[in-house]
Image (cartoon, rainbow, N blue to C red):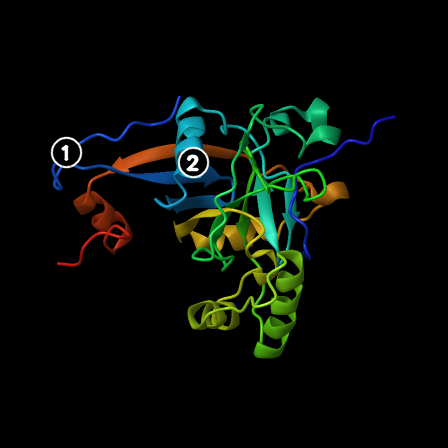
Amino acid sequence: MMRRIGIFILPLAVFLMPISCSAKTKKYPVIELITSEGTMYIWLYDDTPLHKQNFIKLAKEGFYDKTKFHRVIKDFMIQGGDPNSKDEKLKDEWGQGGPGYTIPSEISSKHYHKKGVLAAARIGDQMNPNRESSGSQFYIVQGLKFNELSLGYVEQQIALATKNPGFKFNEEMRKDYVNFGGTPQLDMQYTVFGEVIKGLEVVDKIAAVQTGPQDQPLNAVEMDVNVLELTAKQFKKKFGFKVPGTAKK
């Protein structure tokens, strides 16, 4: 019998066309992710365009609606986006589904696994040496706080996994991992393409639910995913800060 292979994250180791418009009327997409544990809002990075555009496309199509967070590991991450999770009869196959395609890797040293980031799940390196991402499955990091000693050990792990003997966390990354937390052991191995900008406490609530076999929540945590199109003024009013990456005034 062929062994089934799920799309997961190891604890250790038709697109949108740009539209020209004035600064006052330009709209910025924000992901609204509604769950039984609360609502979170996610900003998608511009410099991971393949993942950003794909996520927006699927969200607008309703692909994610009624899917579940099918894999939850406290102090690590919460994972969802599998269309199989809409069907209880396919419970043994949750974590194996997708839209039928993968996305080329957009791994960047600029984006790292601090608490609250959105990243793409994928099949492991042996079957996926180019580290292409699942077409739909994603995870949101909860993680843990690290100290300098443990970060040094993680640097060695990443150096081996990425065949980059000189790998080191920069000062900003070290501060975030020490003071804020995350999963640094995943850096440079998965594509990080967004982050929670409001509702981070919802990640903690989902990560705390009781789970059973295959880290599946005993009580389903469903999601509905919407794309909000906000002007810069609307964005600031809703979130209390300016659109990331826009010029300061």
The residue located at (43%, 29%) in the rendering is: 59
The residue located at (59%, 72%) in the rendering is: 151
Q: Which amino acid type corresponds to the residue marked 2 in the rendered image?
A: Leu
Q: Position of residue 171 (x, y in %)?
A: 44, 73
21 versus 197 height, above or below: above
Q: Position of residue 246 (x, y in %)?
A: 22, 52
Task: Tell me which label, 2 or 1, sits earlier in the chain.
Answer: 1
Is label 1 in a helix, a strand or a loop?
loop
Q: Quadrant of residue 74?
A: bottom right
Q: Position of residue 52 (x, y in %)?
A: 40, 38
Asked whether residue 198 appears in the rendered view, the answer is no
Mark 2–mark 1 distance (CA, rounded to whole Å)? 22 Å
The residue located at (74%, 42%) in the rendering is: 214
Q: Quadrant of residue 97?
A: top right
Instruction: Tell me the mark number nearer the camera, choosing from 2 and 1.
Output: 2
The residue located at (46%, 32%) in the rendering is: 224
109 versus 228 height, above or below: below
Q: Residues within 10 Å of mark 2 (few under 14, many from 20)?
A: some
Question: In the image, 61: left or right of 245?
Answer: right
- Checking the image for residue 50, the label placed there is 2
- In the current view of this chain or complex, which residue is farthest to the bottom? 149
Residue named by callout 1: 21
Is label 2 in a helix, a strand or a loop?
helix
Q: Position of residue 73 (x, y in %)?
A: 65, 51
Q: How many marks overall? A: 2
Find out whether the residues at labels 2 and 1 contact each other: C-beta distance under 8 Å.
no
Question: In the image, 81: left or right of 227?
Answer: right
